[in-house]
Image (cartoon, rainbow, N blue to C red):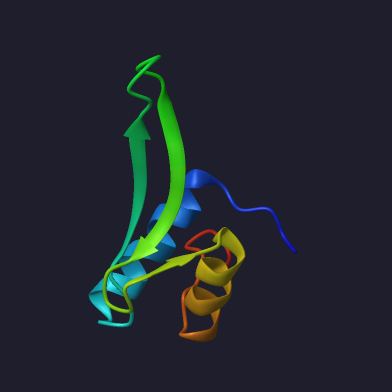
Amino acid sequence: MKKFTDKQINSMILHLRLNSIAEIYYLEEKDPYTLRKLDKGFYDYKTDSWISREMLISSAIETGWKDKKEK
């Protein structure tokens, strides 16, 4: 699968939100012992489920997301 930048991933998340397809957020939490941030991943509040980066990319592309650079 093609590599996407964080900026492109954010654009995909915005695309999915604006088109009422998903309500995805990237979640982190702090370890109570070390206070380091721990990545939890992508969560879709619309379906109440965790999704992978690949699922997010796939869903965005299937629903018409286009990279502004690739016109």
**Left or right of 23: which side holds 53?**
right
Asked if residue 34 is positioned above or below residue 64 in the image, the reply reads above
Residue at 40 percent of width and 54 percent of height: 10
Quarter of the picture containing the C terminus is: bottom right
Tell me where residue 49 appears, x and y as whole percent: 39, 70
> Which image quarter: residue 11?
bottom left
Residue ID at (41%, 20%): 36
Q: How many marks?
A: 0
Q: Residue at x 50, y 68 (%)?
A: 56
**71 shown above or below 2:** below
Residue 40 percent across, percent down from the top left: 44, 46
Q: Pinpoint residue 17: horizontal percent, then vertical percent.
A: 27, 71
The outermost residue toward the top is 34
Residue 25 shows in the view: yes
Assign the N terminus to one quadrant of the image: bottom right
Horizontally, residue 68 falls left or right of residue 28, namely right
